[in-house]
Amino acid sequence: MTYIAKPKFHHPGLKKNELGYTHRDYEGKISTLCAGCGHDSITASIIEACYELSIEPHRVAKISGIGCSSKTPDYFLGNSHGFNSVHGRMPSVLTGANLANRDLIYLGVSGDGDSASIGFGQFAHSIRRGVNMTYIVENNGVYGLTKGQFSATADRGSKSKKGVTNTDNAIDLVAIALQLGATFVARSFSGDKTQLVPLIAAAIGHKGASFIDVISPCIAFNNHAGSTKSFDYVREHNDAVNRLDVLVGRDPIAVDYAPGTVQMVEQHDGSRIALRKIDADYDPHDRLGAQTFLQKHAAKGQIVTGLLYVDPDAEDLHEHLNTVETPLNTLEADTLCPGSAMLDKFNASLR
Amino acid sequence: MSDKKPISSVNDFVVRFANVNGSGSASANEMFARAILRHGVPVSPRNIFPSNIQGLPTWYEVRVTEDGHLGARGGVDMMVAMNPQTWDKDVAGIEPGGYLFYDSTKPMPSTKFRDDITVIGVPLTAITNSTYTDPRQRQLFKNIIYLGALSALLDMDPKLIEQLIGEQYKGKEKLLSSNVHALHLGRDWALQNLKCPTGLRVKKSDKVGDRIFIEGNSAAALGAVYGGATVCAWYPITPSSSVAEAFTAHCKKYRHDPETGKAKYAIVQGEDELASIGIVIGASWNGARAFTATSGPGISLMTEFIGLSYFAEIPAVIMNIQRAGPSTGMPTRTQQCDIIACAYASHGDTKHVLLFPEDPAEAFEFAAAAFDLAERLQTTIFLMLDLDIGMNHRLCRPLKWDDSKQYDRGKVMTAEMLEEGRDFGRYLDVDGDGIPYRTYPGTHPTKGSYFTRGTSRDRYARYSEEGSVYADNMQRLMRKFETAQDLVPRPLQANAERPTKYGVIYFGSTTPAMDEAIGLLETRGHQLDRLRIRAFPFHSSVASFLAEHDFVYVVEQNRDSQLRQLIVNENGIDPVRLVPIVHYDGSPITARFIAKAIGDHQDHLKVTPLRKAVS
């Protein structure tokens, strides 16, 4: 980390997005993570995705649990409210925040300890409720902030920096998210910004529970030989299922339109995802197929990345609860309180 | 039969029904209590039920009390013994001279009875079997048949019961007429075959007035509706589940947009208590009024979040319907045993606001007030109910609401205020009351955002591990807690007729028993000033009350005298002057118990010293 404060001035010619915000408007405080940390690359991708989508920075609520990953919301979107809550409990806090105001964008940032161990239950239940959110797990297979203990996503047989071999089976959060009914499921790699930025953008555009597992090597405790979450290991074993671009009402210049290899997915907010298929058989609308595909590749020691599943017509928790369009946090006594006349009737029914 | 005279009493006796759980007796028994109310005679019913759905013993006790004593009395004047499992214990529990009502279809050996009570046998099974063929009908109507027989034995007006049946089965004519028929089957059999009435009689009176008959959990849930709660997250746990269920029912009735049919509320059944309080904290952080309802084990699970609410200053309302602990304890029995656990919940230095309603009417008021307090103080507010208030129907004054009332949303800095250039420091004490301003997420594009965290930070919410910065914040939190003293409901004091050196402090569901005990103590010649505590932090009048009396009894329903501990700790007074009076077997405290415990202590204090007596 560096302790030099980030300067506030910037080049006057800095590019602006549709709303007139520059890249700098999406940045936050300077990171206190280790230099070269995969999490900082994810932070950069979040900033890039929000800039590209022309989101008003203050309309995002960024919520996290505890751990290295959960510190990162301080390092992006400095004009958004952030909540570094309780270890493993980001999903419930986010769910509550989302219920209070359905108009904001909810970004949940968590780690593998936070989501696969202490918060495994909350991860699962927020997904099965269909909370409208983008849930990012910055997955390094290790407890960084407490110096290198295995997490529940560490692969069986992988070695810790101290040379200890992990004998427990690993939890694959992507497989679980698919099984629990997440309506947007993806995996990526912190070192692959080309793939990650459009995935985050698409997840934000998705209405419903979006889950992205981002393998993010811990350079301090999990980037050695024998680790299955190191930069080298992931690069060697990465098998991308597709590449994508997110198009927000702009010309799809970047997209390769080669017939039979591009699939367009239109989301509820009008944005479109262009999937450039690498694996010709892969269908991102087939939940069962995605599960099988994932298992088959895992058996071969391959880490599948890309958009594994999306349901463009998903419903969210507010639809299940049939809540009013107006955010609940803006309702006052005139609409919430039934009043004294109603209370008199209520009293009369109890005599 | 011995020469013990049968008890003779009008409008002042206790009837206890012993049933098998799941036999459908609950609605007949409740109808019995309501029917007496319709005679203008106050009743105080209590469910004594197992942690079970079917098969285990359950009791329903109705105290008929013209004088309006709504606490449990203790003792049984008439036992309606419908459960063979508990027969021996039930028969043994009847007061000498009392009555035993039982199903006499099958002959019982004489050893199964007592000779100092009046035994009333009605062949309930024989009557039902000769009238009904369907087994379920036999079971259900048997309950109504005993209700009919009791109406004759206790001299009740059958028209009033018919009226209740009519209200219950409005629009279901077939059920209505068959229930009325069953009622008269029992009543006519009793009139023809038994001496009616017995010594216990219900006589029409006018002592009920405009009071309502409601469970505390339902009233608290309605308080949440009136108080503007829009988010409720909960996890099922006895005895609190009916709060969330009642909130759901009230919201369905009062909180749907008449045009769109959409809900102006969101209720989530969490996967556990941790998620429930997490949802509440997230919603409150984002500016909605949110609450959860739970009981002791749930409080234990929630404590980490409660600490966050205290330290990061996020409003939350927790309704704690207390049951007997520790651990799983006695899930269906009452206690006031979470006082310390809630007052100091979570690790580190914390203190929390507790509200102690005495009955459903106050539960309604305090529940609504809890949301104002939570947002004003930006912290957790506990509404401390217990099973006795929460899950029993209690006669209480009608619920009231002032339509001119606006919600107190506390110190919230708006986009306009930020535009004006107001200095926003999330943890900055601008008014000297320890309460800072907060902003809702999404307020302003460039101003007012901050990072909420459970770690220490400075007045502008910037992370800090500086000792002085941490201490400054902790001291402000203390100032805020002092501010709370004058915002929470004050204690209510009632002085004895003659000046006295003795006082008594009590709270919550102990109130009706305490009020009754005062009368019993007066007849023994003991005068006591009373102080009913309604909230923590304690108002300064608590310290004054302690200073004005030599000895103060603290009456409560837990083993360790938890309120007393809290008073001693917070007021720094000599514990010797606070005499614990504790009742903790899981049954509701009674006036008889309190009067005996305090009376014996008083008698002891008044014993003339030996030296004086002989000199």
Image (tube, helix red, strand yellow):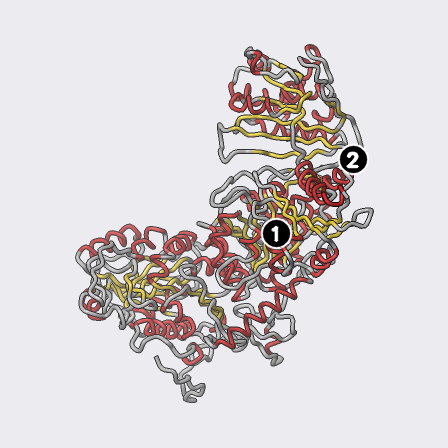
Q: Which residue, as the protein is rendered here, is positioned at the far front?
A: B615
Query: Disc 1 designates what residue?
Result: B563
Q: Which residue, as the protein is rendered here, is positioned at the far right?
A: B498
Quadrant location of the N terminus of chain B in the rendered image: top right
Q: Which residue is pictured at 27% across the width and 52% down the height?
A: A291
B76 on left or right of B328: right
Q: Residues within 10 Å of mark 2 (few under 14, many from 20)?
A: some
Query: Disc 2 designates what residue?
Result: B207
B543 on left or right of A184: right
Q: x%, y% of residue B194?
A: 69, 12
Is residue B213 in sight in this rendering?
no
The correct choice, above or below, for B552 with respect to A57 in the image is: above
Q: x%, y% of residue B160?
A: 73, 26
The correct choice, above or below, for B338 with respect to B395 in the image is: below
Write down the chain letter for disc 2. B
Q: What element carries label 2?
A: loop
Quadrant location of the C terminus of chain B in the rendered image: top right
Identity, as a three-letter code, of the amino acid under mark 2: Lys
Tell me where residue A275 sits by quadrant: bottom left
